[in-house]
Amino acid sequence: MKINTVSEISNLVKKNLNLQFPGFITQGVVKDIFNSGSFLVFSLTDKYSKVKCVLRFADKNGLVLEDGDMVEVRGSL
């Protein structure tokens, strides 16, 4: 069996997820917001799950997010 690099596994997962979810819309509650360079990083949660999200500051268009906000997110993986 071939030993794959971490990058190979990551690319394989991303490719397969992109085939299943080329773009999506979801909603949830914003948690754990912080700035990371030119990105805003936060978690989007519902009753059972949490997903990390990254928003480029260039895409914010005046958006102000706070912990506890219910939002609709359009994105890709």
Image: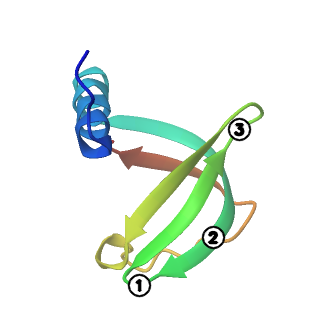
- Specify the quadrant that holds the N terminus: top left
Looking at the image, residue 25 sits to the left or right of residue 15; the answer is right
Q: Residues within 10 Å of mark 1 (few under 14, many from 20)?
A: few
Residue shown at 31% from the left, 28% from the top: 17
Q: Amino acid at mark 2?
A: Ile
- Secondary structure under badge 3? loop
- Specify the quadrant that holds the C terminus: top left
Report the residue marked by disc 1: 37
Q: How is the image coloured?
A: rainbow
Report the residue marked by disc 2: 33
Report the residue marked by disc 3: 46
Q: Residues within 10 Å of mark 3 (few under 14, many from 20)?
A: few
Could you tell me if residue 76 is visible in this image? Answer: no
N-terminal label among 2 and 3: 2
Task: Please tell me whether residue 23 is drawn above or below residue 73 in the rendered image.
Answer: above
Q: Residues within 10 Å of mark 2 (few under 14, many from 20)?
A: some
Q: CA distance from mark 3 to mark 1?
A: 27 Å
Give the image location of residue 75, x and y in percent: 35, 46
Q: Amino acid at mark 1?
A: Gly
Task: Please tell me whether residue 5 is drawn above or below residue 18 in the rendered image.
Answer: below
Q: Amino acid at mark 3?
A: Asp
Give the image location of residue 35, x and y in percent: 52, 80
- Secondary structure under badge 2? strand
N-terminal label among 3 and 1: 1
Question: For the residues carrying marks 2 and 1, which lies nearer the camera in this image?
Answer: 1
Task: Please tell me whether residue 32 is drawn above or below residue 1 in the rendered image.
Answer: below
Task: Please tell me whether residue 4 is drawn above or below residue 71 in the rendered image.
Answer: above
